[in-house]
Image: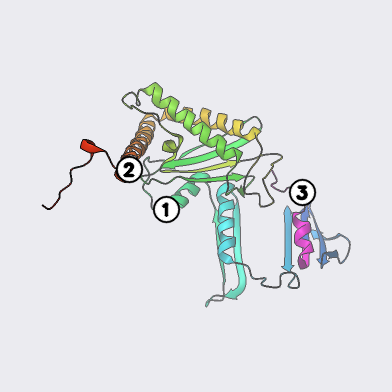
Amino acid sequence: VSGGLHGVGVSCVNALSEHLTATVYRLGEVWEQEYEKGKPMYPVKKVGETDKRGTIVTFKPDPTIFTQTVEYSYDTLASRLRELAYLNRGITIHLIDKRTKKDDGSFEGETFHSEEGLKEFIKFLDGNREPLTKEVIAFEGEKNGVPVEVAMVYNTSYAENLHSYVNNINTHEGGTHLSGFRRGLTHTLKKYADESGLLKNLKFEIAGDDFREGLTAIISVKVQEPQFEGQTKTKLGNREVTASVSQAVSEMLTDYLEEHPEDAKIIVQKVILAAQARHAAQKAREMVQRKTVMSIGGLPGKLSDCSEQDP
């Protein structure tokens, strides 16, 4: 599934390149075409035979367009390729930097590969945070034609750490798929907690934020015709995706909770603690505000605080 909006990916790269070569390995043959300043140097031609499949695109940025710099950041490339390896488990991506050599004559480089995909990604993102459950919760399925993959784990921290992707694109600002995840998570955990009797002694409502305190989660969906808000593609706008993701998360998370009652209890207890802390903080804030208002306005007569006067 492509993430492109207008099909201009390689066209734009070609237009902004001093030189570009496209080599295609297909049906046992190798085909090639070169471009200079966006224009073809010759028609597509067959240059050999092969048992490979795929495409290689080599390009050199045009310094007359990129006047400030044409240098690539190794760290930026490594971060993005590592992300892609986690999102597409089983593939192998090689990054080789041939700009400088090491002392032994080799080039700087890394290989990115993940067999567990999002589960490994969660462990990488969580780093040294202490998880509450032994295993990362991971599930995948499809609802209304939208493949949904989720990995999540609760830790002892108080921060909410959610990452969302559409067709391998990092949607930093979230969107309808993230809204669907939040809705499905809240509905499922609240329903499970109510039915299991874990909330019977709680005297106030649990808020949506309570269900996500200390949660690290990755939501990855595939959408046939993604509609992004803005050209930066940082927020998904397809309204139908909300319901698809919410239903998928509800069904798959319900199955997990029923099959892992101990983990379910730990998670609900974490949610209850978050709610109690929020409620206590709210009460304390209200008390401070009330005291402040009373001290500013003053109290008449016998209701005012005692004061000491030096006779």
Q: CA distance from mark 2 to mark 3?
A: 63 Å
- The answer to whether 119 appears left or right of 280 in the picture is right
Which marked residue is nearer to the observer: mark 1 or mark 2? 2
Give x and y (percent) for residue 129: 38, 50
What's the mark number on residue 182?
Answer: none
Q: State the residue at coordinates (77%, 65%).
A: 20
CB contact under 8 Å: marks 1 and 2: no
What's the mark number on residue 6?
Answer: 3
Which marked residue is nearer to the observer: mark 3 or mark 1? 3
Give x and y (percent) for residue 175: 60, 41
- The answer to whether 174 appears left or right of 17 in the picture is left
Q: State the residue at coordinates (29%, 42%).
A: 298
Query: At numbered mark 3, what does the secondary structure look like: helix, strand or loop?
Result: loop
Residue 125 belongs to magenta span: no
Crowding near pointer 1: few (<14 within 10 Å), some, many (20+)? Answer: few
Residue 9 belongs to magenta span: yes
Image: 202 above or below 275: above
Please provide the residue range marked out in magenta. Answer: 1-21
Q: Amino acid at mark 3?
A: His
Q: CA distance from mark 1 to mark 2?
A: 51 Å
What's the mark number on residue 297?
Answer: 2
